Structure formats: structure tokens, C-alpha cells
Amino acid sequence: GVEAEGKDILDSVELYDVANKTWEGGQAMKTARYGHGMVFLPDVGAEGTVMVAGGTGTGLAYLDSVELYDVQAIKCGCV
């Protein structure tokens, strides 16, 4: 990640395992983001998918991209 005007703009992903009460790192997103929105899509994929949208990127430019994060495969892809 990078820092712009005191904001950490990150591409890192962390998943919480409820059963074990632990955090696990996942594959980084394609675009570092700050102030983005996320929503869980339970009907997509075996264990669901998280959609990450918008936010600001490096240079505090607004992003118009969306990434889908496959929870089971622990990988991210741009849409």
C-alpha cells in the first residue's frame, strides 16, 4: 500500500475465520483502495463472494472499478 495525505491506501486482504477466531492473509487486490465499499454476495460461489467497489486510489484519484473476491479460492479479480 501507499500513503497519500495521511491516508493508507491498501491492496491487502485479510479474512476472518469465525471457527478458529483467527485472521488469514489473502491475495492482494489488483488496485490499492481507501474509502471503498464492500458487500457480501452469499449466492455467488460456494462460500460467497465479496464485491469491493470504488474508493480512492493513489494520488487520491476516485476509482470507478469493481473487484470480486472469491472467499473460497482466496483470490481477487477485477470486473
Image (tube, rainbow, N blue to C red):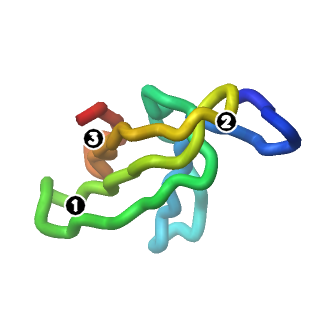
How many marks overall? 3
Alpha-carbon span between mark 2 and mark 3: 30 Å
First in sequence: mark 2 or mark 3?
Answer: 2
**Disc 2 from disc 1: Cα separation:** 33 Å
Q: Residue at x 23, y 60 (%)?
A: 48
Q: Residues within 10 Å of mark 2 (few under 14, many from 20)?
A: some
Residue 47 — which label? 1
Near-viewer residue (36 or 18)? 36
Describe the element under mark 1 as helix, strand or loop: loop
Image height of 39 relative to 62, above or below: below
Identity of the residue drawn at 13% across and 58% down: 44
The percent position of residue 25, horizontal first and vertical second, equals 55, 42
Which numbered marker is on residue 61?
none
- Foreground label between 2 and 1: 2
74 over 19 or under it: above or below: above
Secondary structure beneath disc 2? Answer: helix
Q: Position of residue 77 (x, y in %)?
A: 29, 32
* SS state under label 3: loop
Judge left or right: residue 8 versus residue 36: right
The numbered dot on residue 60 is 2
Residue that mark 3 sits on: 73
Callout 1 amino acid: Glu
Q: Decide if residue 25 is in sight here.
A: no
- Badge 3 amino acid: Ala
